[in-house]
Image: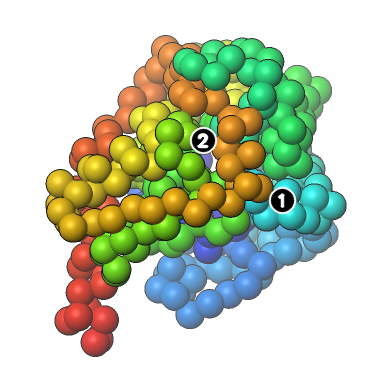
Amino acid sequence: MKKILITGALGQIGSELLVKLREVYGTDHVVATDIRKNDSEIALSGPFEILDVTDSKRMFEIAKNHQVDTIIHLAALLSATAEAKPLLAWNLNMGGLVNALEVARELSCQFFTPSSIGAFGPTTPKENTPQETIQRPTTMYGVNKVAGELLCDYYFHKFGVDTRGIRFPGLISYVTPPGGGTTDYAVEIYYEAVKRGKYTSYIEKGTFMDMMYMPDALKAIITLMEANAAQIKHRNAFNVTAMSVAPEMIASEIRKHIPEFEIEYHVDPARQAIAESWPNSIDPSAAREEWGFAAEYNLQTMTSDMLEKLSKKYSPSTMAK
Ligand code: SER
């Protein structure tokens, strides 16, 4: 990776990956794109282009003008929004992906796009879900993710594009909140704990899903992209995880820092159904063996860090600035 183009650069993953990549590869070596520009430090910190990923011509022009050798394609709708607007999700998630793969093919770029635990479905083994297993998701997001994994494999086998991918669990971060995902509760709970000392969860007590702290996700992307091609067999896409948790487990960890924290439940049937169709815990051993994946943060260390960072972000002195 010497010159990188990121789509969805102002989203949950993009806004942090962009900063990290600019630190590692140099500011001018990372071209940020998103459908909108804002005046955040992130957007203003280096090359930025407005890009709707369904516009293949513009995507090609930007990539060519900046002479990029790597595309990190992040722009997509998450699971709950995709379920509410399935046709839009198909057009954006699949249309954007095929456009980005075409640009990678034409300009001989290395390519990364995230898959998700959403690529599994109700007939997938729920515990310690293997790398290779049944993938019959029942959501539009899952259909997009499975099709995306296959399409990336296809571009590798057919055209030799160096495609790589990771099936991310729910990602937890304090910089840019996710939007429209099923795992978003595990981010909101920390914001609400700091701001109000209580949280109403739309996911039922006892519902397990995998999660990971954003610094581990960023490290995983860079490590996989830098891995020697001869080392990696699975390419699209590797299971990774750092923890398998249910809402009450996060709540009790928060209580170690904020003893009066309260959680209650008001279940959203749509998102609960999606959560129940996903694995409880996935097996990341292929990622570990093939490119040395290791998560640094667990529930305890992630909770301490999230609460510390959010308390600073929402402290009266910071807010007054
Ligand atoms: N975090 C995503 C979602 O909930 C899953 O990949 O949609």
Question: Type of residue at label 1?
Answer: Ala
- Quarter of the image for residue 142 reads top right
Q: Which image quarter: residue 113?
A: top right
Q: Residue furthest bottom?
A: 320
Q: Nearer the viewer, residue 248 or 7?
A: 248
Asked whether, in this view, residue 240 is left or right of residue 118, the answer is left
- Which part of the image, by quadrant, shows the C terminus? bottom left
Mark 2 beta carbon near ligand 1 (under 8 Å): yes
Could you tell me residue 135's position as x and y percent? 70, 21
Which numbered disc covers residue 168?
2
Q: Answer few, some or many: residues within 10 Å of disc 2's Cα (few below 14, many 20 plus, some between 14 and 19).
A: many
The residue carrying mark 1 has its beta carbon less than 8 Å from ligand 1 = yes
Q: Which amino acid does label 2 sit on?
A: Phe
Q: Residue at x 62, y 68 (%)?
A: 49
Which residue does the numbered mark 1 point to in the structure image? 82
Q: Where is residue 218 in the image (x, y as percent from the top left)?
A: 41, 42
Q: Choose between 69 and 77: the one closer to the eye.
A: 77
Q: Is residue 192 left or right of residue 7?
A: left
Comparing marks 1 and 2, which lies closer to the viewer?
A: 1
> In the picture provided, is 293 more to the left or to the right than 303?
right
**SS class, disc 1:** helix
